[in-house]
Image: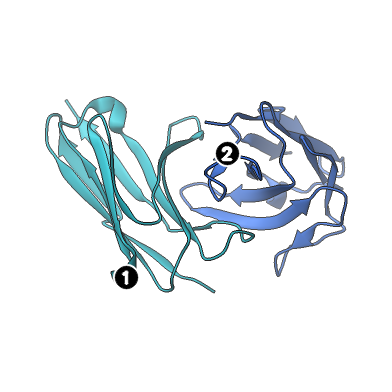
Amino acid sequence: GAVVSQHPSWVICKSGTSVKIECRSLDFQATTMFWYRQFPKQSLMLMATSNEGSKATYEQGVEKDKFLINHASLTLSTLTVTSAHPEDSSFYICSARSPRDRLYNEQFFGPGTRLTVL
Amino acid sequence: GIQVEQSPPDLILQEGANSTLRCNFSDSVNNLQWFHQNPWGQLINLFYIPSGTKQNGRLSATTVATERYSLLYISSSQTTDSGVYFCAVANSGNTPLVFGKGTRLSVIA
């Protein structure tokens, strides 16, 4: 399979600060990455689609100015939570799809980042 | 958009028992994946199975695309099988996965 990493694995920050989460595809190039959010005991909800070299596409209800996504290379996408508030506390998970993998449509997920905003 | 329903929502098994988890979806798909989310939140890829049948050890899966459902079979369950099992689908190569609400499995010794 393909390996996706995330950093940090957990972060605690004060309300009003910004937090950057990195998502890397370690052994393949990913033109498309996805960002999901998961609240306790709930399913994963798509936040945005990140495309290398272009602007991200956000799902309805997700504030693009609050959740800044940058996909500057074929192996790295970043999600920055700006001016974080306690309601932004959640588990953030990224996934990547490899265009060169023989299982073209299969997605691989990172280990997630647990964000707690005090 | 496409809808995904999983059943049962919760399942408690005695160690050694077998189980079947179901995933229904509302539209044709070209990607269907089963995941196991462990207690630390990591999603483990179990199967990529938009159609057909696959087996991996004690786990197997079958997707009947024409009838829009998939089944995940767990045989001889172990306590380490506990966690949440998600089914996720996409109906084109460029679209993200849509997740069901999951089945929470508890295997007790």
Colouring mode (rainbow / by chain / secondary structure / one colour): by chain
Which quadrant of the figure has residue B74?
Answer: top left
At mark 2, the secondary structure is: strand
Give the chain letter at badge 2.
A
In the rendering, at what x and y percent does residue B75 appear? 17, 36
At mark 1, the secondary structure is: helix
Q: Is residue A66 above or below residue A111?
A: below
In the image: residue A82, left or right of residue B16: right
Q: CA distance from mark 2 to mark 1?
A: 28 Å
Q: Which chain is blue?
A: A
Q: Is residue A27 above or below residue A17?
A: above
Q: Nearer the viewer, residue A36 or B24?
A: B24
Badges 2 and 1, same chain: no
In the rendering, at what x and y percent does residue B105 appear? 29, 42
Q: Which residue is mark 1?
A: B66
Residue appearing at x 46%, y 48% in the figure: A41
Residue appearing at x 86%, y 47% in the figure: A82
Q: Amino acid at mark 1?
A: Thr
Q: Is residue A60 above or below residue A46?
A: below
In the rendering, at what x and y percent does residue B76 appear? 15, 31
Q: Specify the label residue B26 is tagged with.
A: none
Q: Specify the label residue A109 is tagged with.
A: 2
Residue appearing at x 42%, y 57% in the figure: B101
Residue appearing at x 20%, y 42% in the figure: B12
Of the 4 image quadrants, the one containing the C terminus of chain B is top left
Q: Which chain is cyan?
A: B
Of the 4 image quadrants, the one containing the N terminus of chain B is bottom right
Q: Amino acid at mark 2?
A: Phe
